[in-house]
Image (cartoon, rainbow, N blue to C red):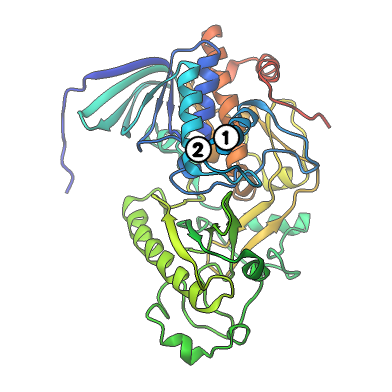
Amino acid sequence: MKTEYCVSLPLMKSADVVVLGGGPAGIAAAIASARNGAKTILIEQHGCLGGMMTLGLVTPIGATHTKSGKPFGGILAEMLDRVAADAKRYAGGTEHLYSSPHVIKHVALDMVTESGSEILFHAMLVDVIREGNTIQGLVVATKSGLARIDGRIFIDATGDGDLIARAKEEFVIGSEPDVLKNLTVTGLDKVHEEDRAYGDYDESGLMQPVTVMFTMAGVDGARAERLINKRLTFADFGITKEEFAKLPYANTPGFTIDGEDIPLPQGRILFFKTARDGEYVINMSRVTAVDGADALSLSAAEIVAQKQVFYIADFLKRYVDGFQQSHIVESAATLGVRETRRLVGRYILSGREAIECVPFDDVIAHGSYIIDIHDPQGRRKAVGGAIKGDCFDIPYRSLVPKTITNLLASGRCISADHVAHSSTRIQGTCMLTGQAAGTAAALTLSDNAAVSALSVPALQKKLEEQGVRFYRR
């Protein structure tokens, strides 16, 4: 039964540019917009900035340079420099850009406030006020009740395309029919770390699995790291299936005994070193068949993944040499969702174009991360591999909707297919598309035109003036 509910909405805030989502893309978008003269507000549903970099403990930023090591620059590089400097002061330094999430929170907050952008924490999108092809404002839920936020240009940096969906702009969710078969053309239809084909599949509509990250300390890395990304059997640990079956979590989601391989949610042991000796971020939980854009599915997955954290920690302490004296330090405050809605924009970047590094005249950002599709059906590990050039182009048209004239996408929800998205979703790339969106929004205000009418050469020039590097090929 549906219930109609009418309420008078107070105007809480108004701005030239409204950025929804305070993760990597939203941070860069808000900074770029404000630095280019637009009155900007950044809306975040949690109580800190950083998104998965902070709340999700995904501290490897990724895709900060080309494959050959040339920096992408811009706000991304600026933030990394400041994180490294503050980490030395507050958190004992960084290693491979893996820093304390708390330092990233601090740096992101400083950079956004220094830019002049406002921040509204603890506000969640409820609906969009749209007139014709223009968004007039957002309806948000706050501790003060429902309220209206008005703006002239809006940027979706939610990751899940919440603003795109509420505005009734076209989007796709999950993989397209037969899209993975295109990997065969590029030779990337291989399971990571193994020289075997992924196999037959029809992944239409399925999404990559979700994960809760956590950290453990007291780890002897020299002993434990030898097992990373290896295919492991019961015999490798000197135990039998019968012994494993006696564990309290045996045959729970992710730990189902099937064959001789050790049943782990990701089918492998995977962790990353932090800046502190003996401390590692563990990336081993996995829940499949989850729709991260559906409230009930998301909540159910949180329960499963949070339980997996303690089951995985128990397994590591019991059986993995180097973890005997380890303990959990922290688990992520929220589920890590890899894939949900993606804009169907003026251009859809394809996996083939990303892999083969096809150039675009309207490039506004580069990506360089591997094609990294965590198997939506949970058949262990991931599929893909390295792109074939130094970096690939992301066109401005992949940020621009077909219909709404004052909306831009950034980060994980830009217009890309399932394969290309598996690389563009990486946090460094999200910051680059965020800076492009924020800069484009400010320039569009100056032109008093639709976002689709913006001069791309003018946008590219402004981005380069503000430190973004383009590598023409």
Q: Which residue is mark 2?
A: 103
Q: Residue at x 44, y 57 (%)?
A: 329
Q: How many marks?
A: 2
Q: Earlier in the sequence, mark 2 or mark 1?
A: 1
Amino acid type assigned to the residue bearing label 1 in the image = Val
Quarter location, residue 196: bottom right
Amino acid type assigned to the residue bearing label 2 in the image = Val
Q: Nearer the viewer, residue 243 or 452?
A: 243
Q: Residue at x 16, y 27 (%)?
A: 7
Q: Secondary structure at mark 2?
A: helix
Q: Residue at x 72, y 47 (%)?
A: 352
Q: Which residue is mark 1?
A: 83
Q: Secondary structure at mark 1?
A: helix
Does residue 370 appear in the picture of this structure? yes
Where residue 299 is drawn, which disc sits there? none
Dots 2, 1 in contact, CB < 8 A: yes
Q: Residues within 10 Å of mark 1 (few under 14, many from 20)?
A: many
> Up-down: is 442 above or below 68?
above
Q: Residues within 10 Å of mark 2 (few under 14, many from 20)?
A: many
Quarter placement of the C terminus: top right
Q: Label 2 to label 1, Cα distance in Å? A: 6 Å
Residue 303 in picture, x, y percent from top left: 34, 61
Residue 69 in picture, x, y percent from top left: 78, 40
